[in-house]
Image (tube, rainbow, N blue to C red):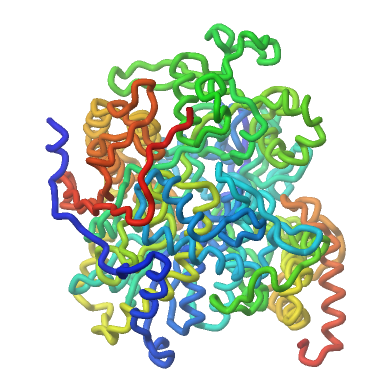
Amino acid sequence: MIINLRVWRQANAQSAGKMVSYRVEGVSEDMSFLEMLDLLNEDLTVKGEEPIAFDHDCREGICGMCGIVINGAAHGRANSPVPTTTCQLHMRSFADGATIDVEPWRAGAFPVIKDLVVDRTAFDRIIQAGGFISINAGSAPEAHSVPAPKIQADRAFDAATCIGCGACVAACPNGSGMLFTAAKITHLAMLPQGQPERYSRVKTMVAQHDADGFGGCTNIGECAAVCPKQIPLDTISALNRDLMKSLFKKDGK
Amino acid sequence: MTVTDYYKAGADIRDTKAPAGAIEKKWSTRKFQARLVNPANRRKLTVIVVGTGLAGGAAAATLGEAGYNVLNFCYQDSPRRAHSIAAQGGINAAKNYRNDNDSTMRLFYDTVKGGDYRARETNVYRLAEVSNNIIDQCVAQGVPFAREYGGLLDNRSFGGVQVQRTFYARGQTGQQLLIGAYQSLERQVAAGTVQMHTRHEMLELILVDGRARGIVTRNMVTGAIEAHTADAVVLATGGYGNVFFLSTNAMGCNVTASWRAHRKGAYFGNPCYTQIHPTCIPVHGDTQSKLTLMSESLRNDGRIWVPKRAEDCTKDPRQIPEEDRDYYLERIYPAFGNLVPRDIASRQAKNMCDEGRGVGPAVAEVDHRTGEERQVRRGVYLDFASAIERLGQKAVETKYGNLFDMYAQITGENPYETPMRIYPAVHYTMGGLWVDYDLMSSITGLYVTGEANFSDHGANRLGASALMQGLADGYFVLPNTINDYLADAPFEKIGQDHPAVVEALAGVNERINRLLSIQGTRTVDSFHKELGNIMWEYCGMERTEEGLTFAIGRIRELREEFWSNVKVTGVNEDFNQTLERAGRVADFLELGELMCVDALVRRESCGGHFRAESQTEDGEALRHDDEFLHVSAWEFTGPGNAPILHKEPLEYEFIELKQRSYK
């Protein structure tokens, strides 16, 4: 296959970026999208040009490190029946000779570092604001001392599958990180162990979300449509319910 | 050259930290003996932890909770992305919730036997002992383990053991455990005890008077080379499977932190012990960048076969009649069939493909000795047709649906209709930096945890044991043993102008400048791929003296070419992924040689490794306890010099040695 790419090139956070065209030959349909970029980068390196910077690590769809907007869609679902991470998108999803636009996540809270690489440390700060259960190593009770009903545990699990890739933010017209935040809120709120801090957690995490420059949620639903782990949109409703309740609790405790 | 020309024999070494006495008492005795650090003094002490996976993230969080100042580093953009996240299957613990007569002793026994009697008894017993605490800890953190309708935890059996002791979270156990550790870690970041440095790569260890006192890192965004000093250093930097280029490791996994420590005096234990996993998705072509593992639970219901005749290999498998198929594992090992251990399943798949009976796309392979290229099909069928017939498609979907989806996504084929293709891939490295019972390396004040150390899995790791070891080290072992060392504080203050710091910084800068100034014609990846091919061919599933000596020579040539002809674009003071990879490949080029030397000296078939010169009459692995019942701990003696081999004799006081048999 031959693929024509238009790739966002930006030297660093301070400089302006632009789309640059490349032609990639010798692409096989079994290659992943990132392997196609590897092929282009090898070619650029041999020519003495700077390769395209992009984030990636596990390349099996679980670490959440990769993330590129492909033809306007976060992770570039192409004709895949289910949403995927960029690393699990394969070239057989594209036609021979196709022209593909390749851009970084674009959101106020995710400044570009270089080319397709963005800074997602705001997500870590949201977790620091309360996305945990306060327990020190060594002080845990016996695992079976607190049963967790299976239905709630499964619901917690569905939310806990979030990989923190940031596609939800990139897809949202408001640049909101609400699906990410709601996934963690729901994960912990559905478990008995998460109850003591349930209402303080939702307040502090949402406050940090807003402080980091993410936009507000207006229930558009683009986030859930691109989420490679299919985090359901109703986690945001669950977050909002908890947030409302927390307002009637003293200090959120 | 003979084998003895490749290394020098050194003095035997021993672990001096495990106390004498009954095995059940050793850990509690050691904890009681270990000195303590007063909580008021802990905040005056700083510990560096490199890596944020299960071993590193858990250790950093726990040391932070204890009140130490922790500096934690990772090369990813967030600590949540460490490659522990990719583990699928589960985590073992001797809870005996199933009432199937499991116990600490049995988990200990299974792990030692699984490691083919090449692990240290004391360490493994402790691992089994703390396994239950791990499950308690993770549940309390909110890790959503699979549960039954009664609300209690579910277990499954895993990895060929006879009890159901594996706790799991769908096929994403590693992810959920890591997120648990990550949440605890971020809690400590918020509390101010842990300072997190993401997108930082460790490039050097700083030694002062023989003690580990700091590291040099490169800020991967700005290129700044920085020295960080501390009272102790912990490496939790994972395995080195990427020396094979293609592996199930993440793209960024590397040996640099361990190798830099090795060059500074840390012994490297059993570097040739790697685990090859039989059920991975085969290579599709020469642009393949990594391999994907599928849970080996697939072998419970799938039948493995290749065509009897090479000319059938290009046919649609559904058109090949039953009598023309060779279900080779069922044929050779009628008792165990498709459930033979990982190493046997892997080696036989290779044998079938070497015979020309592999299936799937033909991939070019270069014979490194002649330079000739040949086309080889590297894949065998894993067929669910009979399982679907027996259980129905619905039942197969319930059991393996997510794996089938993953396979379909990557290959574009529907495994419900055509048989899957699988091939072995490098998955885990049991070898790593040598540590004692306290997890301290041969450098005073340098601790090594998780996959980065060599300690618990012997020559072969049991399924669902890697997660257990990472968290055992991180939450429960290291935070107790490191106090004993830190109790010696206060240590001399090390400033940025200390000669050892200045020298380490200069060395790192000099190396980076050298990499950038070569401006040759070959890319970093082309060297990495060639090294990987050599390692896979000669230091992979089957090894011979002739192959290994050839490989050592070839690696030396490749290393020389690398340092004279590699092309690294860009500058240091920038986000430069080519430069990052160049530094890692340079270290892999040194490690690869040591792995081959270690494999050459260990003239026995053991655990995951088949040494052609050491087999039984019917071609099965033959261990040599008379000669090789020891850990090989290697000392670095300078680039290109023969390393020194220190043997740590393994003593089996509590478990009787047996030869494995699967026929």
Q: Position of residue B471 (x, y in %)?
A: 51, 63
Say whether residue B312 is left or right of residue B16: right
Q: Position of residue B46 (x, y in %)?
A: 38, 80
Q: State the image coordinates of residue A112 (x, y, percent, origin top left).
A: 59, 60
Residue visible at 24% across and 41% down? B626
> In this view of the protein, which residue sits in the foreground, B289 or B258?
B258
Decide: is B346 above or below A19. Answer: above
Q: Residue at x 17, y 44 (%)?
A: B640
In the picture, measured across the screen, residue B332 lies left or right of residue B500, that is right
- Say if B427 sits above or below B366 in the image: below
Residue B526 in sight in this render: no
Please name whichever residue, B279 or B372, is drawn nearer the observer in this view of the structure: B279
Along the line of sight, the residue nearer the viewer: B284 or A108: B284
- Name the quarter where the N terminus of chain B is drawn: top left
- Residue B85 visible in the current orientation: yes
Decide: is B273 above or below B352.
Answer: below
